[in-house]
Image: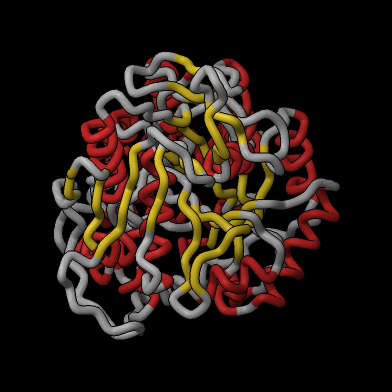
């Protein structure tokens, strides 16, 4: 176990960074004084620092931790760097916008430095854990197991329901997109599928195909649903495109619920800077499903980091699944895992989390102009391997409209390939609401003492039994 001794004059951002590193390291914290534990001590290391003044941030370095017989010291420069990356501080402070009103990816520090496919904050947390193990020697270091049921990493499948009604318009737009890329073979395949398509509903068949594939692999996923009144203007913008109370929408929601998947809100463009719009759409979706809506992801990933999450919290959401790059698959927050939210104005939140989006199908096909689904899965597999190495969380987004009649030949087969790729690597797979609940339980686990056998005594006040623990050799340990 460790004690955390922090300088009294840490800024809110530095304190958030310290908490993030400790959480991601999986080191079990001892809340009370006790003998024979390894200490993590945060010191300024002769740095000058003015409370509240802006500090230059550079990318965090995993080799910056200082070892001594007394414990491990974390320079405050490392904390500022970790805090800036994990909070998306530069994005929160930027006024830049792209054509969808989003902060451009280039504002993100990791993206600008070309390391956005490397979860640098997660790797720093592992380096902290290794440093503690090094200095502890014979002193006990207790770790929280990374994922339930003995799994060493996690994965989540998510879907944004963008298309329900007026599907021929989406097929036409997709054909135009393919024509601009001179993908004539794919266009022929789409057109060849249209006669059969016209005899049924391709959207319903696409949903059934995904649900069937997930049923076969015993996977439960998260679905984000638009829930506002569409207009001609919203449809022209690519925003709200279907009625939440339309018969087909209700049929789709019922099918998702029968399979016990999670349903979350896909926030419309209007929600980006409006707590009232978030609240109205969340309440409407809850009334339709009869269940609590805990998660949200913005349509087109359209948000202003900081203010948008502030409005999400006010509307009662537990987590945001928006933080991914639209034009590059990778790690927007430098973390391959659930991470607490930090608002540059309000500080860290205890009740609201961010679940970074690691991989998205349309990032590869639309922005990187790769139209071979097998290469999409290769990209997903590369990032899954990275997440597995840091014992983190891979979050993927597969759009239900990625199907042949809607312009994506071989889409159904590719999704089954994606599921098989993940299953072969044995992650813990669950809806994001379940994963967030697990990670909060792990994050808040504390010990208050060691008993006579050297077993940690869990701090009271947590719901349910404490999460499982292990030593640095992965041997399972017991709570007192």
**Which image quadrant: the N terminus?**
top left
Residue 254's quadrant in the figure? top right
Which x, y percent locates residue 402? 47, 40
**Which image quadrant: the C terminus?**
top right
Task: Pick the residue in front: 125 or 236.
Answer: 125
Residue 154's quadrant in the figure? top left
Task: Pick the residue in front: 109 or 78.
Answer: 78
Query: In this picture, is 216 found above or below 19?
Result: above
At 60% from the left and 18% from the top, the residue drawn is 218
Query: In this picture, is 138 found above or below 156?
Result: above
Query: In this picture, is 224 found above or below 432?
Result: below
Whether residue 16 is visible, yes or no, is: yes
Query: In this picture, is 46 found above or below 398?
Result: below
At 47% from the left and 62% from the top, the residue drawn is 300
Whether residue 398 is visible, yes or no, is: no
Which x, y percent locates residue 359? 37, 43
Task: Pick the residue in front: 104 or 192.
Answer: 104
Residue 459's quadrant in the figure? top right
At 74% from the left and 34% from the top, the residue drawn is 255
Task: Pick the residue in front: 250 or 390.
Answer: 390
The answer to whether 28 appears left or right of 113 in the picture is right
Count of numbered circles in the view? 0
At 60% from the left and 40% from the top, the residue drawn is 441
The answer to whether 208 appears left or right of 389 in the picture is right
- By what rule are the colours in the image chosen? secondary structure
The answer to whether 85 appears left or right of 225 in the picture is left
Which x, y percent locates residue 195? 55, 35
């Amino acid at each position: 176990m460790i004690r955390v001794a922090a300088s009294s004059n840490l800024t809110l951002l530095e304190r958030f960074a310290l908490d993030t590193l400790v959480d991601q390291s999986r080191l079990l914290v001892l809340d009370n004084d006790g003998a024979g534990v390894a200490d993590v001590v945060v010191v300024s290391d002769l740095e000058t620092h003015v409370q509240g003044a802006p500090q230059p941030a550079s990318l965090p370095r995993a080799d910056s931790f200082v070892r001594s017989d007394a414990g491990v010291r974390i320079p405050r420069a490392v904390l500022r760097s970790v805090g800036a990356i994990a909070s998306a501080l530069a994005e929160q402070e930027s006024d830049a916008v792209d054509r969808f009103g989003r902060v451009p990816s280039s504002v993100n520090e990791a993206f600008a430095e070309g390391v956005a496919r490397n979860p640098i904050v997660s790797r720093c947390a592992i380096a902290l854990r290794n440093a503690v193990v090094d200095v502890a020697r014979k002193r006990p270091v207790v770790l929280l197991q990374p994922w339930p049921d003995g799994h060493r990493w996690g994965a989540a499948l998510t879907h944004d329901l963008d298309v329900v009604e007026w599907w021929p318009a989406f097929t036409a737009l997709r054909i135009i997109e393919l024509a601009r890329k001179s993908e004539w073979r794919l266009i022929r395949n789409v057109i060849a599928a249209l006669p059969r398509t016209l005899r049924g509903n391709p959207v319903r068949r696409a949903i059934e195909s995904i649900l069937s594939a997930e049923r076969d692999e015993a996977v439960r996923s998260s679905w984000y649903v638009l829930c506002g009144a569409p207009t001609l203007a919203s449809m022209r913008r690519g925003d709200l495109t279907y009625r939440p109370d339309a018969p087909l929408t209700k049929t789709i929601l019922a099918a998702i619920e029968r399979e016990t998947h999670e349903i979350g809100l896909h926030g419309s463009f209007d929600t980006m800077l409006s707590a009232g719009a978030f609240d109205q759409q969340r309440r409407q979706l809850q009334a339709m499903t009869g269940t609590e809506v805990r998660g949200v992801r913005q349509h087109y990933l359209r948000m202003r980091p900081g203010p948008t999450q502030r409005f999400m919290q006010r509307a009662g959401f537990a987590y945001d699944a928006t933080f991914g790059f639209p034009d590059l698959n990778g790690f927007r927050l430098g973390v391959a895992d659930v991470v607490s939210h930090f608002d540059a104005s309000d500080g860290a939140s205890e009740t609201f989390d961010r679940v970074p989006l690691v991989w998205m199908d349309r990032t590869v096909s639309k922005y990187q102009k790769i139209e071979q689904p097998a290469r999409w899965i290769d990209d997903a597999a590369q990032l899954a391997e990275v997440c597995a190495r840091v014992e983190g969380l891979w979050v993927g987004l597969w759009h239900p409209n990625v199907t042949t009649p809607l312009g994506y030949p071989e889409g159904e087969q590719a999704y089954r390939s994606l599921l098989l790729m993940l299953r072969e690597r044995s992650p813990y797979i669950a809806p994001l609401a379940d994963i967030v609940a697990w990670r909060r339980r792990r994050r808040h686990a504390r010990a208050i003492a060691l008993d006579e056998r050297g077993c940690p005594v869990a701090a009271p006040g947590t719901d349910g039994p404490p999460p499982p623990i292990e030593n640095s050799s992965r041997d399972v340990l017991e709570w007192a």
